[in-house]
Image: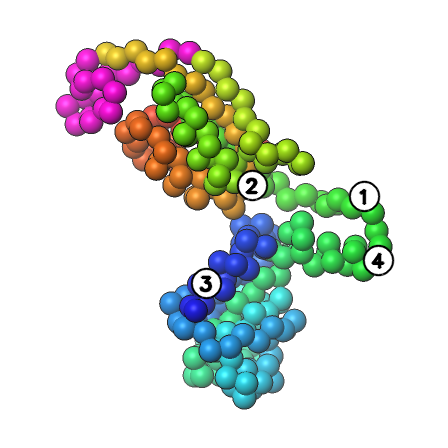
Amino acid sequence: MKIKDITNCIEEIAPLNYAEDFDNVGLLIGDFETNVTGVLVTLDTLEAVIDEAIEKNCNLIVSFHPIIFSGLKKLNGKNYVEKTVLKAIKNDIAIYAMHTALDNSIIGVNAKICEVLGLINTKILIPQKNTIKKLTTYAPISNVEKVRQALFNAGAGMIGNYENCSFNTNGIGTYKGNENSNPSIGKKGEIHSEKETLISVIFEKHKEQNILAELLKAHIFEFQISQRWHRILPLTVVQSF
């Protein structure tokens, strides 16, 4: 098992892009491709924790607080942060921090505190902005069900206690490919009209890359990546709200 296998599981619970802007989360020291010999979990990564990891043959420390919070300009061992980082590097010990990514998780630290206190009807008091996104894409009638199901399977369309939620409307799409195009329906250089369905779904932002990847696999149209729109064109737009 590699470090990335463990961090991928952690990030399903506490996605890194849920962390506050001021925070420093994720793999702070180490290589994702390193094979794991053992994992040590801690609140803070101090020098004594590094010593314990060495003793127990653990080359990955999962910490709540990040040992590196702001930029380090020197590593001379003049304070406890520098000493800890130096010792971790010398002994090939990786350090991963969760902090506010776990704080903001619906099943994170605060949720556990609420559970212990016996609280009911709990909710996030200061919700993080832009955690929900909306994807709008268009698919020919023959391809609609495959595309829609691929989006659902990737985690789109979840609203509270409901799943497979989407908005759909039918219409006529037109396009004309240039000499560099490779249309799957129609011919390059000719205007083509196609009965299409607009599909709109919402999703949690940490699922975006997987959702877009599955969309590309399922859709029969040719896609292009455009920096202008920062998303896949000509058929897909992703918005934050």
The residue at which mark 2 appears reads as 204
Q: Amino acid at mark 3?
A: Asp
Q: Magenta stretch?
A: 171-190
User: Residue 117 — which label?
Assistant: 4
Residue 53 position (above or below residue 169): below
x then y, percent, for residue 209: 43, 44
Q: State left or right for residue 64 relative to residue 68.
A: right
Q: CA distance from mark 4 to mark 1?
A: 12 Å
Q: Quadrant of the C terminus?
A: top right
Q: CA distance from mark 3 to mark 1?
A: 34 Å
Q: Which of labels 2 and 3 is toward the front?
A: 3
User: Residue 222 — which label?
Assistant: none
User: Residue 121 — which label?
Assistant: 1
Mark 2 vs 4, N-terminal side? 4
Q: CA distance from mark 1 to mark 2?
A: 22 Å
Contact between labelled residues 4 and 3, with CB atoms less than 8 Å apart: no
Mark 2 vs 3, N-terminal side? 3
Q: Which quadrant of the structure image shows residue 1?
A: bottom left
The residue at which mark 3 appears reads as 5
**Circle 4 Cα neighbour tier, 10 Å, few/some/many (<14 / 14–19 / ≥20):** few
Residue shown at 18% from the left, 19% from the top: 188
Residue 148 position (above or below residue 62): above
**Circle 1 Cα neighbour tier, 10 Å, few/some/many (<14 / 14–19 / ≥20):** few
Residue that extends furthest to the left in the rendered view of this protein: 179
Secondary structure found at label 4: helix
